[in-house]
Every structure is written in C-alpha cells, then in structure tokens.
Image (cartoon, rainbow, N blue to C red):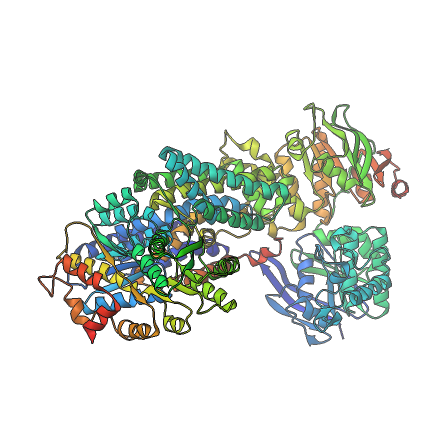
Amino acid sequence: MSLLRVQSVSKTFVTTRALREASLAIEEGEIRGLVGENGSGKSTLASIVSGIITPDSGQMFMQDKPHTPKTVLEANNAGISIVVQEMGTIDGLTVAANLFLGEERRFTKRGLLKTAHMNKAAKQALRTFGIENIEPDADISALSFEDRKLIEFAKALHVGPDLLIVDETTTALSQRGREILFGELQRLKAAKKSIIFISHDLAEVLEHCDTVTVMKDGVIVDTLPTAGLDERKLKELMVGRELQQTYYREDNEASYTDEVVLRVRDLTLKGSFSDISFDLHSGEILGIGGLTNCGMHELGKVLFGLHAATSGSVEAVRHGRKVSNYREAIACGLGYLPKNRDQEGLMLLSSIKDNICLPSLSRLRKNTFISPRKERELAERGAQQLSIKMSSINQLCLYLSGGNKQKVSLSKWLVRDSDILILDCPTRGIDVAVKASIYTLMQELKRRGKAIVMISEELQELIGVSDRIMILRRGIVENTLNRRENLSEEEIIHYMI
Amino acid sequence: MKGIKKLIPYIGLALIILLFGVLTQGKLLTLRNLKLVFNQAVVLIIASTGVAFVMAQGSLDLSQGSLLGITGAMTATAAALHPGLALPMALLTGFAVGLINGSLLAFLKIPSFIVTLCVLFVLRGLTVIATHAGSIPVPMEMLAFDSYDIKVTLLVLILAGAYYLFNYTQTGKGMRAIGSGEVAARYSGVPVERLKVTAYLISGTLCGLCGWLNVVRTGAADSKTGLLLELDILTALVLGGMPLTGGSGAKLQSAVVGGLMLALLGNGMVLVGIMAELQQAVKGVIFLLAVYLSFERESAVLIK
Amino acid sequence: MRTKNKLATALALILLIGVLGANVVFAEGGQEKPYLFGVSIWADSDPLSKKVISNLRYAADVLGAKVEVAVDGFKPDNQVSNIENLIARGCDAVMICNCTDAVVPKIVKLAEEAEVPLALYFRMINDPEIRKYAESAKYFIGNVHEDEIAVGYALGTAIADKGRKNAVIINYNKGDTTAGNRYEGYKKAFAERGVKLLGEQWDILDAEPAVNAVESFIAAFPELDAIAVGGGGGGPLAGTIRAVRNHNKIGQISITASDFGPDIEDSLRNQEVAAMSGGHWTDPFFTFMLLYNYVDGHPLSDKPVTITMEPIYLTSVEEAQQYTKWCMDQPPYNEEEIKNMTVRYNKDFTLADLREIAAAYSLEDVMERHK
C-alpha cells in the first residue's frame, strides 16, 4: 500500500498549463527527490498535494483514502505538511506565534492566549529540532533568512506529518542549516515517514534521496532509484537533451584590462562591514564570497547607493563622480540585481515590458515624451536577447517561472547598457539551463568590457566564474584570490570561517 | 477572464445609462439633463483625476473633502479682497496641502491612510473656524465664471494633460511602478520620495481648482462644503476600475468613467425619485459590488 | 483591446440614439399634467421638516398638484444641485429654505435660466446687495419668514409677566440671522420691563454645551431666575432643562425657547418651560400658495413679495392641548380655505388677502375658524 497516490492530476493557470496528467506514488519511509527546471511543475504538484491550490482534474489518495484538501490545514490533518519555496513566515509575529499559527486554541484559556505557555512549547520544539540560537519571543522579522526557513521547517515538522514536502529550501540554508535539515529527514525516514524533497541541487538530491522523479514542462518524465544515477544523467532527463558543455568558463586565468571603472575606498557600513577597498576593472568579474551574514549582501546595496555608507567612498571612475545614492549610481552606469528577486528585483504585478523599460525611461524620453513604440522595441530586444519564455511582453511577471523572472530582472540593466553590474546571487533558485545561460551571458559581457561584481553563496559558482574572489568574514576582507587552475572549495572555506 | 474585468466599468456605465434611461422614460438622456449631469460631475471628475495619481502609487488621499472646504473658505476670503485673487489662492491652498500630505507620507513614512485622514480632520476644523461655522459669500460677479464653456475647456485641458503625464512620461510611469512594487521601483532608479510628493501636489492642486469651481458655482463657501467628497472620489475611482493597490493596472480613465457613473447614478435616482437615505445605501452597495468584481484576489497575497 | 473599442462604439451609439430619441420625445409632450412643485429642505425626518412636508402635500392634494421633495442637509452645494435636479425633473416651481444668503444669487440664476419661478420659505434676505439682485429677477417670486425680533420680544415679555428679574440668554452662533434677531427682541423686552440680563453665551448648537453653559450660569448667579434659549427648541433646550433639573431649580427658573416640538405639552405641565414659540411650519404653506397662483397664471403681484408671519406662543398646558387638537391633529387651513386662497377658485383673491391671513395666524385664529 502506497502512502500517497496521485492519479492524472492537471492544473492550468490562466494560460499556462502547469501540470498535465501527473501520476506518482510515494511509499512509506521513502525519501523522494523531485527535480526539474523552473516552471516544470514541481511546486505546482507540491502545492496541490499540500492543499495550497486545488487541481482542475485528477484524483489523489492518502493511505487509500481519497485526498482532496482545500486548505493547508486539511492537508495537515491528512498527515501532510509543507515547507514552501518562498517566505512562509509572517512578519510582526513572534517566533512562537509563527510556529503555532492556526493552533492558538491549544494555548488559549477562557479566551486569553497564554503567551508564556506557548513560548515554552515553542522553545521545546525548537530545541528538539536542534535550533539553539533562536528565542521563541523574538520578532521573526529580526531573524536571518536562514533562521526563518528553519522555523518554517520546525513548524512543518511539529505537526507530526506522515508526508513532509520540502520545496527548494536548502538554497537558503548554510552548511549548519543543511545538516540540521538532513538529520531530521533521516530521523523521519527511520520512523517510517515519507518525504518529498524538491531541489535544484542535484548532488544533494542524489546523496539524500532514495528515488528521484524528474519533471519537465508540467509532465512527469521518469522516476528512478538514485543508486547508480549521476548528475549528468539527471540533467539530461531534466533538459530533455544531452548537455554539450560544462557551463562554467573554461580558461583558468584571471583576465581583465587595466582600466579601473569602480574605485572603492575604506567603505564602512556600521554593523555590517568595514574598511573595504578594491578596484573593479573593465572586463572583470569580481566574485565576493562568504557566509550569508558576512556583510556581502549589504555591501552590494551600498555599492549601488541604496544604503548610505557610514564612511568611505565609491567612485565611478569613468564619470569622475562619487556614488552616494541609487539615482547617481544608475546615472553612472551601475546596475543591481538583488538577491530577493520577487520583492526587490521585480514588480510582479507589472508586465515584462514595464519591468524591462523602467531603468531606461530617462534614455527613451524625448523632452518629456516616452514613445510606446520605443518602449515596445526595447522590451522586445531585451526579451529576445535573453530568450525569455513568454506569451508576449505584456504578460505579467507574476506568472513567469523563477528563471524567466531572473532573466527579466537582468534584462533591465542589459537594455540600459550598464557598464558595471552588481549581481547578488544571480543564480539563486533557478534551474541548470537558465543558470548556464546566465554564466554564458556574464562571459559575453566580460568580453565586451563590462565589469561585474558577483556576490554568491555558491562556492562552485565563485570558482567557476570569477576572475578574482574577494572573501569576506564578519564584514572584513579576509583575502582576495586570483583565478587559477587548482583553486579549491576548501581553500575558500578556510578564509570564510 | 482578465479582459472581462477590464471591461466591467464600461459595462457598468452602459447598464446605468440603459437602466435609468428606461426608468426615466428617456428623461435621463435629454440634453438639458446631460448638461446637468456634467455640471455635477465636473468637480468629481477633476478631483478624481488628481487622486488617480495618488492611487496609482497604491496610496490613498482621504483629505479631499475637507480640502475642498478649506480652499472654498480661503477662496471666498481672498475674493472679498479682490475677485482676481480667488483662483491663485485656491490653487495655492491645494498645492500647500498636497505638499504637507506628500511630505508626511514620503519623509516621515506615515501611511497615507493615516496622514490624509488626520489632515481631513484638521482641515475640516479649520474650515469651520474660517467660515465661523456658517458661510462666506463671494462677490456676485464671480458667478459669471460658472459657465459651461469655462468648465468644458478646463476639463478637456486637465484630462489631456493628465492623460499625457500619466501614460507617456517618466513621472506617470514611475508612479505606477511604485504601486506595482515600491522596492523594485526604487531599485530600478525611480525617485520614490519625489514622486510621492508630486502625486499629492497634483491631487491637492486639482482639488484646489475644484474648490474654486465649487465656490463660483454656489456663490458661497460653507463649513460643510465638500463633506464626504473623499468617499465619492474613492467610489468613483473604484467603480471606474482603479485597483485599490495601484500599480500597472491603474488607468486614468477610471476617473472619468467612475465620475460619470456616480453622477449618472445620483441624477438617475433623483429623477426616479428615490429617497435620499436610500440613495446613500444604493451607492454603498454598488461600491461594494465594484470592489468585489474588480479585486484581484490572486495578487492580494503579494500586497503588503 | 479590440473588444473594448467595440464596446465603446456601441456605448456611444446607444447614448447618441438615446439623446436624440429623448429630445424628440420630450420636445413634444403637451398633454395636461398636474403642476409639480419642487421643495428643497434640510431634512425629511425631524418633527419640523416632517410637518412642513405633510402640510405641503395636503395643500397640493387639495389643488390637484404634486410636491417633489429633495433633501439638502443645509449644504450650499447640495442646495444648488437640488434646485438643478428639481428643475431637471420638470418642476413648475421650486422653493427652498436657503442655508445662507450667499447661495441665493446662484439659485436665482438657475431659476432665471430655466424660467422656473422660485420662492424662499423661513427666510429673508439680509444682505442688501443680494436682496437687490434677487428682487430684480423676473422669476424670483418672493419669500415668507417670521419676524424673529417679535418672537424674542414676545418671549421676553412672557418672562417679565412671570415676575422674573434676572435672566441669561444662550444662543446659536453669532452671525446666524435668526438667532441674532431673537436676541435683539429679548433685549428690547428686558430693557422695557426691567429684567436684568446677567450674561449671554453663544455658539450653543447642541445639548452638551448647553448643559455646561447653564450650569456655569447657575453657579455664578444664585439670583438667576430666567433662561432665554434664543436658538433652537431641540438640543440647546433639552440641555438647558437637564441642567436646571440637576440643580433642582425647575419651577424657580423660567425657561423660554423657540420652535416647540411634539412634547411641548409635557414640558409646560412639568414647568420645564414657561413659554415657547412655534407652529411656524405653516410658513412654507404661504410660499406654496404664492407659487401656486403664479404657476396657475394668476400671479398675486408682478414684483417679489415678502410675507411676514407670526408664530404661535404657548404658555400653559391648556393652550398646548388646544394647539394639538386644532393645529396638529387637523390642518390649520381646511380644503375650502385653501381653495379660497387661489385665484382659480376665488376670483377676487389678492395679495393683501394672503398677507392678512398669514398675519392673523395664531391659535385663536385657527380655533375660531374651525370651531
């Protein structure tokens, strides 16, 4: 008897068919990997099983009983819980309140919520889960991305699910977080519970899952045991063709011109980083690495003038100007790709066209007039350049897959012909195919003499793409490594920690 | 599905025209009555046009009713000195209040709902004081400005200018971008604070103009002038299809379509002879219906 | 987008056809229809406005005419809109209780443009410039109002008649014509009869401020034995009575006020008030008669007319009972009397007759005619 059976489930969003006739079965005690490119239907399937959305057609059975959850709570009662891809915590509530959201009645006596009681239970839940550093009465918005993800995980677990779905969570986690997570997954497996594990990190999937289901364009391609499977084979299944090349660059030496385009001197943001100085050259890809809270993300924002630095300077050398706010930064040819794509990178409720054109409006206008035709042309050009999959440039970004959203976010700066790009985690949460195209694009930009600052949490990526890697530790430049053949992850980790 | 939603306001307008056209046996559509509807809608449409810029950013302007009151009082006071001072005073008052609204919102980061609601109360108080809880008359010769020619010309100029600004300039596009996603807009170089203030300057100044129009129409500034206008404006815009969240779905046409709808509805109900209290209730129900039909539930999740 | 354009075109067509059709249809018309009288009023649910409306409807019924009521909340913009709307509805004449002189020119202008006769009720025009403008207009028929100075004087006299010597006045805001005139009347009566005016308080529009003001007066002047409520038989009077009762001074302090309501009998019985004026809801009736005769083709005058009315004064329970019986439970002017106020049914009727009837209005007058 299978724990969960999904039979011919389909779902259509507006115009996109997100899921077509998907069927699968999960056994007790099984860890099932679910992989596929962005937009292949993984999250849709997970959402349907966990009651976030309802399918258009098809049937589901949980322990042979019909499973038709209309809400997450109903799915919880049927023994299914989920950790979602996007942020699932609610700002303004405490850790404990988030943890027990929807279960307040457990801690309510005569209509009064016993906060102390709830905090105590929350503390216990967190500690059994191996989280030592978070207090239950802390405001959740004060926590790091990773900690918030872990709390979501704890929330999903304490329901005591028979089936746990983990949707793209590990990208947000550090080594410590991953260890906690996989430890828990093994414990669940030992207790004959099942897991659906969705991830772009194929190595991780192969290492921790028993079986893996591959999806492509809303269809389930195949389900295979992980034993005897390698990444290359998996990628081919996902992309549906044989991969021709490795996607990192092939040269082994740093190569850039002598022309300095961005001069950073003694840059300090109190509480985040201090005394950072470097020169960014035309044709250079400067990688910045470190632990997620080492200050590198804040550095990106200060470089782009979104936060005012406490002291120090950023100079756009070609313009001979100091950059002190984002308007000046853009005027000096800087572009910025934020880490938080959905909130900071894109206006989801606007069209692809509006998003792409926004930074370039000042260039499109003639006196005050902005011609709709020119806007259209610019957006078409940008979308074509990055081969964005869309029905038209008037499509809302909301309905795009993660990879395509990232392309739109990048396209804004490409059509503006920005000289200096600051990319914060440019491949976070996107699939291999788009990843590869972004790396190719970066090489292309490098050849054309653009300068790129790439802030990344992925060591492979830093090594594979950068001319130089600047490693930050607790807000201080620990070392700067030049590109060379035998640069290893261990060496970088050594400076990070 | 999405296409139909965009059409709802137009269908609504057609329905109202048809319904009351039939109920009044065509009286609604006589030229004389349409002129009347125009006369009563013109202030609503101009004021809504201004507020459309604010709502495009996902903010609200609830200060309009009292702003109409205080501009009326200031205008009448200025007109007593010299009738030529009336219009500049009206525009100046509207501009100043817009500046205050916008600055409080943009720089002190107080939510627009709170800011403009407080300003609403403050201005109403000032209006009552300025009018000594009664009325201030204006020189009779100013009634001459209350002509169709002037109003039609003003309306056409304002709508043309606003349409251009809203759809074809960096300012208008930036404002809608703020509504679609303030952070993303800022990260793309939109001068968020400046545009927020600008939107309130537009809405304030246009409301100031409405204050002047209102005074030359009635011949008096009264302590109660403009009471509840802000809700009429909000209703008109939402009826016209303006999303409460602003953003790329915001259309300037909402002001015109919604303003006409509300005016025709009010006029139609008077012609049919529906009780005043019931008219309010009907407006409320229709407002609710409009929000229900046009609200984007899917995207509501994304709106903070 | 294309659908929208089609729809817009369809809409424009519907509108165009509608406009053309409607204008053709309404250019004709022609058959005999009852006269329609438009009334803009501050509200339609308080005792005074309810009585005004029902009394007008009764008179219109008698004459085979119809009354259309529009509520304006005493807001100038609404008053202008109401007149516009009433004219658009095809009213043959409109009447209004204007909230301020300032709104009169515009309303007169609307009437002139539409060639619809207009008259005011409860109001006189104080501003000389505006009065001159209105009275030079062809379609301004006139106004009916109470002599508020006389009201104040009569009530002030009633205070003196009770032997009271030390009075205060509380009133609406300064600048309100009605309140100001009553104040003048009170002062005149007090001066003539030797009643000392200890103090006065303005801006009292509601019960709460009235309580506060009266309590202060009682505390400051132990000798206080009369309170004149210049403005309003509603909130201010209720507040005054409450304050006096709180100090156990009912009966010791005489209260006078204007615009009595349905509970006047109880108030007099409990000695809460010493005298009150009211019953002036017949005022709009005379405005209506002026307009009716004009619309019917027999204008009573070729110049604007001002009619001054006397209110009814009540000083005892018996009077109040009589008032209820003769003025409230049955119309003050019966079918025959109403018809006789029109030239249509009474060829010899003149403006002087109408003035005389209005001036004679009092409790005794109604009783005498209907006994």
Residue A461 image position (x, y, % from top left): 79, 42
* Vertical order, A450 against A246 (above or below): above
Q: Is residue C222 left or right of residue B26?
A: right
Could you tell me which residue is drawn at 69 percent across and 23 percent down?
A320
Nearer the observer, B283 or A322 = B283
Q: Can the viewer see residue C8 in this picture?
A: yes
Q: Can the viewer see residue B196 in this picture?
A: no
* Vertical order, A31 against B226 (above or below): below
User: Total label count?
Assistant: 0
Q: Is residue A50 left or right of residue B207?
A: right
Residue A55 image position (x, y, % from top left): 62, 65
Nearer the observer, A250 or A165 = A165
Nearer the observer, A433 or B210 = B210
Residue A302 image position (x, y, % from top left): 73, 36
* Vertical order, C201 against A482 (above or below): below
Nearer the observer, B77 or B14 = B77
